Amino acid sequence: MNVKLLSLIEQRVNKAIYLLSEFLSNSKNHDYLLEKQLSGYTDVVIETHIALFKALNILPHDFLYSVREIQIYYSPDNGLSSNVQLNKKVISYLNKVIGSTLDSNSGFGYSFIPLHLNFYNSFSDLSTVFGLCLIDHSAKTAQSFLHEFTLNTRQINFSTHNINYLDNVLVKFKSDPSVNIRNLSKINNLSYLQFQKDCRQYFGTTFYDFTIKLKMMDVVEDLMFSKLMIKEIVYKHRFAEYSNMYKFFHRTYHFPFKNITRFYYVDKA
């Protein structure tokens, strides 16, 4: 896997956790959420996105990484306690997040804080932590629900920096999706064949296919965290029609809508 796709995965999971924290903060029922529910919501968000990345071949099925779920509790008297041994950087990060949040709000109620941290476990093992922290301001306590992903950096291809011009091409295409892809290749004085060769190395597929995958990630975010109807989502993300979006999810990449939890409707139930 190249560093571009790894960075994309990290950005998307981080954004999804942020959207979850916003959703929970705006929920009318958040005062009554149980610890098991909060842990479950975090699990659903991360597991859904990992399954999506595998379905889209963004995350290769043979890519080796380890995952562990971590639950951490904080109280003013006992500090941090956890079901697993914590890295010192994780401890420092959580103490800083919890401390600054408690200091900035001396009232009552709850805060939902998205968590994201990168650190090296060893010379070659890179760990990334994603999760959610629930802070009870009246009790001055906190609970954190984390997933820690660890991988060996030898699996990552860092040699694609010479074709990162494709990031700028992608920005131009997003600003005007009607532009002809062949014309995009001419911007950098490249042949169309060389342009698509670079795309396959950088994005893992053709330029057009990659833009479809990005749109599908956006659709999943809306399905999970908004109350938009599917037809509204079709229009928002410029699919030709519902059947077109349905085809990509159900037939091309075998990631049906039923695999996506709609939190807004769960919250209403």
Image (spheres, rainbow, N blue to C red):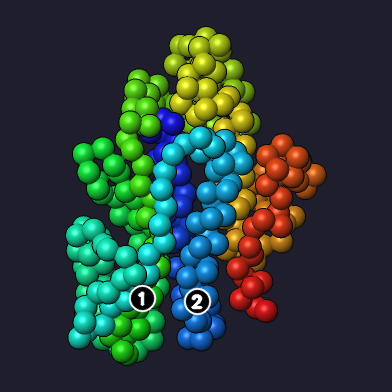
Q: Quadrant of the N terminus?
A: top left
Q: Residue at 67% across / 43% down in the picture?
A: 238
Left or right of 10? Residue 231 is: right
- Along the viewing direction, whichever of 49 and 238 lies nearer the viewer: 49
| Vertical side of 234 occupied by 162: above or below | above
In this figure, which residue is indicated by the disc labeled 1?
143
- Along the viewing direction, whichever of 25 and 239 lies nearer the viewer: 25
- Image quadrant where residue 207 sits: top right
- Along the viewing direction, whichever of 17 and 255 lies nearer the viewer: 255
Category of crowding for the residue at label 1, using alpha-carbon neighbours closer than 10 angstroms: few (below 14), some (14–19), many (at least 20): many
Position of residue 114 measured from the top left corner of the image (x, y, whole percent)? 38, 64
In this figure, which residue is indicated by the disc labeled 2?
36
Q: Residue furthest front?
A: 84
Q: Is residue 30 visible?
A: no
Left or right of 69? Residue 207 is: right
Category of crowding for the residue at label 2, using alpha-carbon neighbours closer than 10 angstroms: few (below 14), some (14–19), many (at least 20): few
Position of residue 35 measured from the top left corner of the image (x, y, whole percent)? 46, 78
Of pointers 2 and 1, the one earlier in the residue sequence: 2
Position of residue 68 measured from the top left corner of the image (x, y, whole percent)? 40, 57
Q: Residue furthest right?
A: 243
| Vertical side of 156 occupied by 133: above or below | below
